[in-house]
Amino acid sequence: MVVIQYGTSPEDIARVLLQAKAVMLNPKEPYTFASGIRSPIYCDNRRLLSHPKERGIIVNAYALAASNCTFDVVGGVATAGIAWASLLAQLYDKPMIYIREKPKDHGRKNRIEGELQEGQLVLIVEDLVSTGMSSVSAVRAVREAGGRVNDCVAIFTYEMASAQQAFQDAQCSPHPLCSFSTLVREAVQSGYISKKDMATVMAWNKSPETWQP
């Protein structure tokens, strides 16, 4: 696979998200996360898969982040992390697995798909991190299956305190390509959102569990 060389700073990644219109704002009718948290802003990284140039930038940034980690296997968190894990595994010529939210209720009833050998070191791949619960759940699943995990790479983090605590408790280091604060700053500078919108989303970010529209 050919790696397209673009800028991979957090600001570059923020601009990629904005260019692909992956960032959505709706303070009046907030989005609901899987955790139940309501948010006036939503980052839909699945949109990036349909944009080849932007996708290439993200894959290159993932690869640079992964170069700072040691791993034997790339593990995608279902479902949004699977595509990115596949691209990264191909680039590094590494085995790949993916981790379901819960075991299937049919067939072999697997939670982890693919081949994971005892003691192998797995790099967890997420598309984004909100509370960190899905990432940490995947970490635990790999460890329960006999694998090891030290690191998790993700395109974006909402920078929630709960996620920071979850990764700390799981003894897993997160490596996001872009943060919430960087994204919002770039969105205002580019005119993607107004300063009034910025005040709204920053207020939400300070206390997402209790924020009300």
Image (cartoon, grey):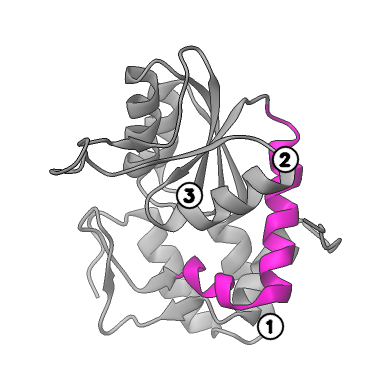
- Which residues make up the magenta segment? 44-69
User: Residue 13, image x and y in percent?
Assistant: 68, 63
Q: Which residue is drawn at 75% across and 65% down?
A: 12
Which residue is disc 1 drawn over? 190
The kind of residue on which mark 2 rests is: Tyr
- Quadrant of the rendering where the C terminus is positioned: bottom left
Dot 3 or dot 1, earlier in sequence: 3
> Observer-nearest residue: 146 or 110?
110
Residue 56 as seen in the image, left or right of residue 36: right
Local packing at callout 2 (Cα closer than 10 Å; few below 14, some 14-19, many 20+) is some
> Observer-nearest residue: 201 or 112?
112
User: Residue 186, image x and y in percent?
Assistant: 66, 72
Residue 84 as seen in the image, left or right of residue 207: right
11 drawn magenta: no
> Which tag is nearer the camera, tag 2 or tag 3?
2
> Observer-nearest residue: 119 or 212?
119
Dot 2 or dot 1, earlier in sequence: 2
Local packing at callout 3 (Cα closer than 10 Å; few below 14, some 14-19, many 20+) is some
Q: What label sits on residue 80 in the rendered view? A: none
The kind of residue on which mark 1 rests is: Ser
Vertical placement of 11 versus 41: above or below?
Answer: above
Q: Which residue is drawn at 59% across and 85% down?
A: 192
Residue 149 as seen in the image, left or right of residue 140: right
Which residue is disc 3 drawn over? 159
